[in-house]
Image (spheres, rainbow, N blue to C red):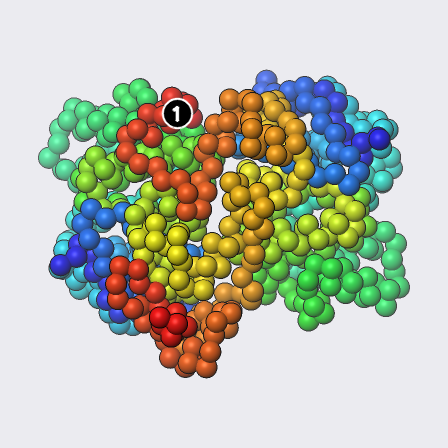
Amino acid sequence: MIPLLAVEDVTVRFGDFAAVSDVSLALMPGAALGLVGESGSGKSTLLRVLLRLQAVASGRVLMDGADITTAREGGLRALRRDVQVVFQNPHSALNPRLSVHDSVAEPLQIQGVSNRQQMRDRITGLLDDVGLGEQFLWRFPHELSGGQKQRVCIARALATRPRALLLDEPTSALDVSVQAQIIDLLRRLRQQHNLAFLFISHNLAVVQLLCEEVAVLRQGVIVERGAVKQVLHAPQNPYTQALIASVLSPGGSRLSGPAVCEGVRAFGIH
Amino acid sequence: MSLIEIADYRLAFDGFEGRVQVLDGIDLAIEAGEAVGIVGETGCGKSVLARSMLRLNPAPPARIVSGQIRYDGADILAMPPDRLRDLRGGTIGMVFQDPVTYLNPVFTIGRQMAEVLRAHEPDLSRAQRRARSIELLDAVRLPDPAGLLDRYPHELSGGMRQRVLIAEALAGNPRVLIADEPTTALDVTIQRQILALIADLVERLGLTLVLISHDLGVIGAVCRRIVVMYAGTVVEDAPAESLFRAPQHPYTRGLLAAMPDLGRPDHMPEGIAGSIPDLRSPPKGCRFHPRCPLATAICSERKPVLDGGPHAVACHAVAAAA
């Protein structure tokens, strides 16, 4: 099977600093791949490479097997339609001056939907998909909760009938009770629309719920990858092990006394 | 007498669109040497409550509607400015969420440490201040503390900056440390290190800790007692083990059920239906009742009070079942 979206030996440099070094990664149609790592590990840079928003120093970007590393906007039409993105902070991802209707309408207009009734029906359908009723149509972002805003962002991403969603920490700015609803929504949408997910997160427990495969990035290099079960429950790489050991599970791990400090110090002050 | 005593504390903010009833009748007593965690979601009032302990909420717009906050018997709300000044950063140290915004980018760490020390111990000589700064940076386990004094904040990682801020909070030899989401802006491995440091300092220095977080995992890692807040009220106040083992309040249960857990791959988190109320016109009675699966008629009429005992809960349904 040909990957929907892939990078091959990609390196990205900012001046002398290599944000991403020789990374190869493939997202298969319908698959869900998690990308985890700490700040500065290159997760978001890689996402920007996949969206062709970031130039690479070397390596290739492929969509459906075709090289799009240097394609111009005309050659990127399929990418822009089939691959959509949802960002971490729904407050800044929505234009405060646009109503929900107008935000979701924008990608539809670009696709050439011009009939008003048709437009209206599509938008209500999309909002319904993400669990928002018709009463939200003419609301503005400041009238919505964080969770509702993220639902609008997801509806907007679905407007082009994409094959893949790239999700960059989509639940990190939300409260846990809202996060649970968005996780549930994403799982349902993935099944309903046969979507592929590239899911970026620092929260391993959330990755476990949404992905089958996971890659661990550190300082621009993939240090471990494999099935979620394998990587998150029997990690081989010392960094992955340290990452997993740092997860504080609800009601579980109490840190106490200097003993923990010693153990932690062995891992080095950042 | 408890070290910190909060009784029937009500705080409101007067805004353009009406009065927001942020805290509604908070009762909380913290003993010396306790490590207490305050947990709740956005807008539940946990940060406002923490700031209230130092009277840091600017008035106006804040308006204290009723109640008292006592530190060691003295009413903080009636305290003269000079005593309040001794309390802030002196007896009670505070650490905030975002280490970037609390350090001045144009001054060296040494100069900022010296400024804090000058406020607390004006009689120290320059050399003494330097020695004390090094001692404090060493106490938070920063490597090469002497070299650090000449560095600027941008040369430090987020975790190191938070350590510097903890060192500054320790400069006044506090008895109490209030930490408001001290690790939320940090990566998980760094978060664990900072929490281990806080736990270690609490033990070594015999501090009383008030840790504010939205994350029960963070709270559970350090605190022995957990206070759960919802919409400006305390809904449950219990020893950590007891709270995790047998949560009583429907909101606490909902919160725990909503948390994904790496150790339990089959646990599918469930959200809490509805959304947090508008505190300009909070629900009557129990503020959680519109979202509560156990709500009955009384819940919309009378506000439940915390029952006594070590595991206290404010819920009509729990009381009726007992």
Q: Residue at x 59, y 30 (%)?
A: A231
Q: Secondary structure at mark 1?
A: loop
Specify whether B309 is left or right of A169.
left
Task: Judge whether B128 appears above or below B232 on screen.
Answer: above
Q: In the depicted view, which residue is nearer to us: A85 or A130?
A: A130
Classify B315 as above or below B207. Answer: below
Residue located 53% across and 33% down the image: A39
**Image quarter hosting the N terminus of chain A:** top right
Q: Nearer the viewer, residue B220 or A174?
A: B220
Give the image quarter of residue B23: bottom left
Q: Residue furthest left?
A: B123
Chain identity of mark 1: A
Q: Position of residue A108 (x, y in %)?
A: 82, 55
- Residue B297 percent location from the top left of the image: 46, 81
Give the residue at mark 1. Answer: A269
The quarter of the rendered structure image containing the C terminus of chain A is top left
Instruction: Name which quarter of the figure residue A197 lies in.
Output: top right
Q: Position of residue B121 (x, y in %)?
A: 14, 37
The residue nearer to you, when weighing A87 against B189, is B189
* Residue at 15% across, 26% down: B128
Q: Is residue B199 visible?
A: yes
